[in-house]
Structure formats: structure tokens, C-alpha cells
Image: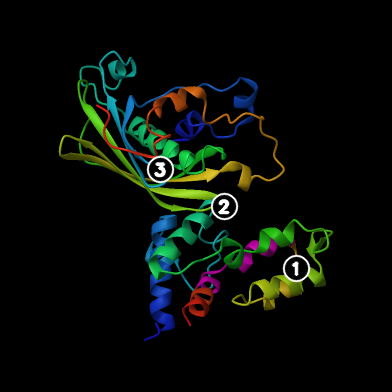
């Protein structure tokens, strides 16, 4: 779980020095309603190397990576709600329940909603589905780190939301409310 | 009809059980949030959000947990102790809290002990009146 938080940009000194590993774990947004809800999509492929080891002969998507996909979907939703002025990091997994395996070739749809948002933090609820089947329910908390770690020095740039993240939102954020682009 | 203190306590207990992953029996009136129940800073925000939803009220975090502002002010803290002025400020901002133990030795490291389950119940009781 710690790795998840770091991947999403949690403040660890070594990350600042190394300019942060950055990766995107969702493929695109399908719906984006500013400050309220977002729906994203991820295709799972056997070309993802970790599936060869998880597990040999029985490849399934690791649950922690489902949490990462939800953290990115919900995290971008929370960040966009404040126009990316805050550095948003995953702070707490409130709960995560998994009902089914996700296998190579599956397309999962991630539904995230903002439950509460305040100057310092936000909480989100989320459901992952494959077709009509509920795969997982994942509720998260995000911290706006600038508001909570007063006095701590951060890099000038917003190290959480890079251009790569913004490109996912092309066509959504400007219009505030857009229905499916596929 | 106003909720009884027992009703409020039961709901607060449910919130804390969910937010902190506890058993019902862990949550007693005098349990401290950080010391006894293991709450960390982000949990305080989680608890605030859940209380707002549960009781349908607005809970400004600095009202329920105002100690941060006091601790960061040199007028209110000196030599690791909360000054008389600081204590007066804390009391004014936390009318729902019992200070009798803290007053004997107002060590800032003990400030976390002020955040008890009963302080939350008192706060909610005040908000619902």
C-alpha cells in the first residue's frame, strides 16, 4: 500500500531528489463531471509483465493495482475540483473490498465520486465494474499536502499533476461536464 | 426531538469503529483518539467528514480539533508547556473538553490526550442543541 501512495506522489524526500517516477495506470476517462464524479477505463493486458508472476499460470490483476487505478481516477477528480492548485496525495484507504478476479483481456470501468471535500482533504467512494459485475468497492481519502504540512518545502511545480495526467483530461476539464467520448 | 447523549455516543462510536477499524468495545467515553484508539492526522479529517454526514451538521475542523493553531503560536507555548494564555485560549476554543487533568501539567506532548471520545460527544451534543 505504501508503494501505491508513493506512486501517486506522496511526499518522500528521495522522490523529490529523483524527480519522481511517474506512471499512468488508467487508459482514459469516459465521463468527467467536475467536483462530483468521474468514470475511467483500464484495459488489462497479458503484456503487463507483473501478470506473469502474479501468478505463474494464473494471471490476475493485483488488488493493490486496482487501488492504484482508483487512486488515479479519484485523485484526478479531486485535483481538478480545485483546478489543480493543490498537491493531492493518497492519504488513506478507508476500505477496499474485492469480489472477483480481473484477468488479462478484461476491461474494467472505474466509477469515482467525491463524498466530501474540504480545504485540507477529500474523501471519495468508488466502484470498479466489468460489464455489470461489481469487481471491487474502494473508498479513499486524499490529502492536500500544502495545507497539512505547513512549513515543509515542496518543489515549485505541482509534482502530482504533470502534463501526462492533464493529457488524460483533454476534452473533459474545459467543458466541465461531458458524457462519454468513446 | 433532541437526541439523547447515549444515542449520540452510539453513533459517534460507530463512526470511530468505521474510521479507525476498531471493535465496539474499544470505544469508551474516556478513550483518547491518538493514544488509545491510534488515530493519525488524516484520520481526524476522516472523522470530521463522517460526523458531518452522520449527524447532518457542519463541523469546522478547527472547532473540533483547534489545538494545532494554539501549538504553533509562540505566545501560547513556552518551554514545551502550554502557557496560561494558551490554556485560556484552548479552553475558550474547546468548551466541550475536560481540562482538569491537563491543567496539572500542561505539557504539549499531552495535548493529544485532550481529544477523547467524550469530547467529541460533547461537541456534537452542543451542535445539535
The image quadrant where one finds the N terminus of chain A is: top left
User: Which residue, given by chain and number where applicable, does mark 2 sit on?
Assistant: B41
Q: Determine crowd level at label 2: few under 14, some 14-19, many 20+ residues with C-alpha closer than 10 A.
A: few
Q: Residue furthest left?
A: A132
To the question of a shared chain for discs 1 and 3, the answer is no
Distance from the alpha carbon under mark 2 to that under mark 3: 27 Å
Residue at image location 38% in from the left, 47% down from the top: A36
Residue at image location 44% in from the left, 65% down from the top: B52
**What is the x, y in percent for residue A122?**
47, 49
Image-quadrant location for residue A59: top left
User: Which residue, given by chain and number where applicable, does mark 1 sit on?
Assistant: B106
Q: Is residue B115 left or right of residue B55?
A: right
Q: What segment carries the magenta color?
A: B108-120
Cβ atoms at labels 2 and 3 below 8 Å apart = no
Return the chain for callout 2.
B
Labelled disc at residue A34? 3
SS assignment for the magenta stretch, majority:
helix
Amino acid at each position: 500500500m505504501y508503494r501505491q501512495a508513493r506512486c501517486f506522489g506522496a511526499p518522500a524526500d528521495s522522490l523529490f531528489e529523483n524527480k519522481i517516477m511517474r506512471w499512468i495506470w488508467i487508459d482514459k476517462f469516459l465521463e468527467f463531471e467536475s467536483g462530483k464524479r468521474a468514470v475511467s477505463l483500464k484495459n488489462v493486458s497479458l503484456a503487463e509483465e507483473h501478470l506473469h508472476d502474479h501468478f505463474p499460470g494464473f494471471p490476475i490483476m493485483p488488488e493493490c493495482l486496482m487501488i492504484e487505478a482508483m487512486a488515479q481516477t479519484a485523485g484526478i477528480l479531486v485535483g481538478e475540483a480545485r483546478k489543480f492548485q493543490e498537491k493531492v496525495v493518497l492519504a488513506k484507504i478507508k476500505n477496499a473490498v474485492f469480489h472477483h478476479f480481473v484477468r488479462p483481456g478484461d476491461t474494467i470501468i472505474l466509477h469515482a465520486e467525491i463524498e466530501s471535500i474540504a480545504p485540507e482533504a477529500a474523501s471519495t467512494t468508488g466502484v470498479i465494474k466489468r460489464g455489470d459485475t461489481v469487481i471491487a468497492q474502494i473508498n479513499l481519502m486524499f490529502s492536500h499536502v500544502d495545507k497539512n504540512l505547513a512549513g515543509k518545502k515542496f518543489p515549485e511545480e505541482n509534482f502530482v499533476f504533470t502534463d501526462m495526467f492533464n493529457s488524460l483530461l483533454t476534452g473533459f476539464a474545459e467543458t466541465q461536464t461531458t458524457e462519454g467520448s468513446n | 426531538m433532541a437526541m439523547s447523549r447515549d444515542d449520540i455516543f452510539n453513533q459517534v462510536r460507530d463512526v470511530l469503529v468505521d474510521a479507525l477499524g476498531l471493535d465496539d468495545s474499544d470505544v469508551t467515553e474516556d478513550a483518547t483518539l491518538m493514544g488509545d484508539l491510534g488515530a493519525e492526522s488524516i484520520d481526524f479529517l476522516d472523522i470530521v467528514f463522517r460526523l458531518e454526514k452522520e449527524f447532518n451538521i457542519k463541523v469546522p475542523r478547527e472547532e473540533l480539533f483547534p489545538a494545532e493553531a494554539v501549538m504553533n503560536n509562540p505566545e501560547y507555548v513556552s518551554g514545551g508547556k502550554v502557557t496560561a494564555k494558551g490554556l485560556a485560549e484552548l479552553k475558550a476554543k474547546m468548551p466541550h473538553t475536560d481540562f482538569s487533568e491537563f491543567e496539572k501539567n500542561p505539557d504539549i506532548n499531552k495535548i493529544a490526550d485532550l481529544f477523547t471520545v467524550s469530547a467529541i460527544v460533547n461537541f456534537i451534543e452542543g451542535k445539535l442543541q
